[in-house]
């Protein structure tokens, strides 16, 4: 079953704008991860935030985690055309679980 | 460094034919291994995962099976393909402990 659900399903922005994607999940987690997928390719890991962290940065990426609301957000600042891709959140289905499950993804289009 | 190989990249098979997709990991030992399927424009559906040789957990009852004959080899099989088996199949590995996943480049399977 799907553990994470991203919102929105699709997002179209102009180059230079910021893009925000949200993820909600259902069970308790040790960490939450964000991945990127270019069309027709495998997924690439972007960032991992642990359950005891509230915010994490990596380059132009900023991830927040609110365990009380079981939600996370991914912010991409100063977007570029090369950021066009689908973005997925992923969690393990409960502490000690090996089941790494993904949401349905947000398809981001950055218009030059 | 660790690498993951998945082949073939594309495959067109007739209904009722068998299937064998192979995934191998290099540069690590005792990985957790995963098979996912992705329908067009959709999220990832976890099909099987394995935490050790001969240990397979099935997430979705269906026309597919998986095997792990060696520590770093994961095989997805079917005896008779259905049209509904078409999709993008992704193999992934993680190290122990709820860590990030590394994905292969995927196999585009079309059943005709």
Image (tube, coloured by chain):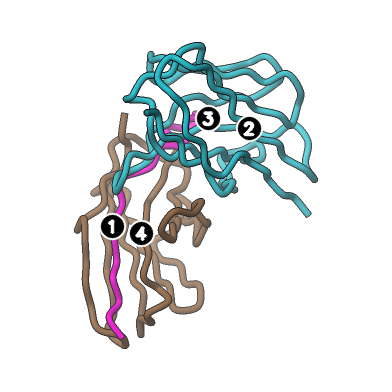
Q: Assess whether mark 3 and mark 2 are in contact (beta carbons under 8 angstroms).
A: yes
Residue at image mark 1:
A106
The mark nearer the N terminus, 4 or 1, is 4
Kindly indicate whether the residues beneath marks 1 and 3 are on one polypeptide chain.
Answer: yes
Q: Residue at x 43, y 40 (%)?
A: B88
Report, in whole angstroms, how far the alpha carbon at label 2 lies from the one at label 1: 26 Å
| Mark 2: secondary structure | strand
Q: Residue at x 71, y 29 (%)?
A: B73
Within-10-Å neighbours for mark 1: few <14, some 14–19, many 20+: many
Kindly indicate whether the residues beneath marks 2 and 1 are on one polypeptide chain.
Answer: no
Q: Which mark is residue A86?
A: 4
Chain letter for the brown part: A
A20 shown above or below A35: below
Q: Which mark is residue B32?
A: 2
Number of marks present in the image shown? 4
- Look at discs 2 and 4 and give the one toward the viewer: 4
Question: In front here: A101 or B78?
Answer: B78
The mark nearer the N terminus, 1 or 3, is 3
Q: Position of residue A21 (x, y in %)?
A: 27, 63
Residue at image mark 3:
A98
B71 shown above or below A67: above
- Look at discs 1 and 3 and give the one toward the viewer: 1
Q: Assess whether mark 1 and mark 4 are in contact (beta carbons under 8 angstroms).
A: yes
| Mark 1: secondary structure | strand
Within-10-Å neighbours for mark 2: few <14, some 14–19, many 20+: many
A102 shown above or below A39: above
Kindly indicate whether the residues beneath marks 4 and 3 are on one polypeptide chain.
Answer: yes
């Amino acid at each position: 079953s799907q553990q994470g659900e991203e919102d929105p399903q699709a997002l179209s922005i102009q180059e230079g704008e910021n893009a925000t994607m949200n993820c909600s999940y259902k069970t308790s987690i040790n960490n939450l991860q964000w991945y990127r997928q270019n069309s027709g390719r495998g997924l690439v890991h972007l960032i991992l935030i642990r359950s005891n962290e509230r915010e994490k940065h990596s380059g132009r990426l900023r991830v927040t985690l609110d365990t009380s609301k079981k939600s996370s957000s991914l912010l991409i600042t100063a977007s570029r055309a090369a950021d066009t891709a689908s973005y997925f959140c992923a969690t393990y289905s409960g502490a000690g679980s090996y089941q790494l499950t993904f949401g349905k993804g947000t398809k981001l289009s950055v218009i030059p | 460094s660790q690498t993951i190989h998945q082949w073939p990249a594309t495959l067109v098979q007739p209904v009722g034919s068998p299937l064998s997709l192979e995934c191998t990991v290099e540069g690590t030992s005792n990985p957790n291994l995963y098979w996912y399927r992705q329908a067009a424009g959709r999220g990832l559906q976890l099909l099987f995962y394995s935490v050790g040789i001969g240990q397979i957990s099935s997430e979705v009852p269906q026309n597919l099976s998986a095997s792990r004959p060696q520590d770093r080899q994961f095989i997805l099989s079917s005896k008779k393909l259905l049209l509904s088996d078409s999709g993008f199949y992704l193999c992934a590995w993680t190290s122990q402990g709820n860590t990030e996943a590394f994905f292969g480049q995927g196999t585009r399977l079309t059943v005709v």
